[in-house]
Amino acid sequence: IADQALRQIQVICRVVLARAALERCAEAPVIEGIVPQLALRTRVDAQLRLGNYERLREESERLIRYGDEFGYLARGIAHHLTEDYLSAVADYREAIKHFPDDPTLLDNLARAEVAAPPSESVKKLLGKDV
């Protein structure tokens, strides 16, 4: 029993340490002009893992301003996870221009399109409120 308890404590400690490390990464300073994309990608990844979707959206927008197309994917994920499907679709479509062969991105786009409310043209085609 003591060995099992020790293993459980070790697992708990690893989880706590991993979360603390993620939180440090999420707050890591970005030094303008010195590999900002790498630092921002690290922060984006940390925000996603921590479930801070508003911060994920903000950091993704900074990536986009630096010209890093990965920001569209990350922001699309943030929109998707907060159920803003129309914005997710728009960002995923932009990301596909840069990563056309990414199967996960294509899957995310399909899922967001299915979850998004139908457009006016679809409603007219069906002839009813959907």
Image (cartoon, rainbow, N blue to C red):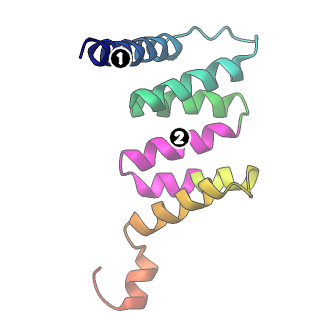
Q: Where 102 sits versus 59, above or below?
A: below
Q: Residue at x 43, y 81 (%)?
A: 122
Q: Residues within 10 Å of mark 1 (few under 14, many from 20)?
A: few
* Tag shown at residue 19: none
The answer to whether residue 116 of the structure is visible from this angle is no
At 60% from the left and 22% from the top, the residue drawn is: 42
Residue 9, magenta (yes or no): no
Residue 50 located left or right of residue 25: left
Quarter that holds the N terminus: top left
Q: Where residue 130 sits in the image (x, y, percent)? A: 29, 79
Residue annotated with mark 1: 7
- Amino acid on which the number 2 mark rests in the picture: Arg
* Residue for badge 2: 75
Q: Is residue 57 left or right of residue 98?
A: left
Residue at coordinates 66% horizontally, 50% vertically from top-left? 95
Quadrant of the rendered image containing residue 126? bottom left
Magenta span of residues: 69-91
Q: Nearer the viewer, residue 89 or 15?
A: 15
Q: Could you say where residue 23 lies in the image, as x and y percent from the top left?
A: 44, 14
Q: Callout 2 environment at 10 Å: few (<14), some (14 to 19), or many (20+)?
A: many
Secondary structure of residue under mark 2 = helix
Q: Residue at x 41, y 34 (%)?
A: 53
Q: Type of residue at label 1?
A: Arg
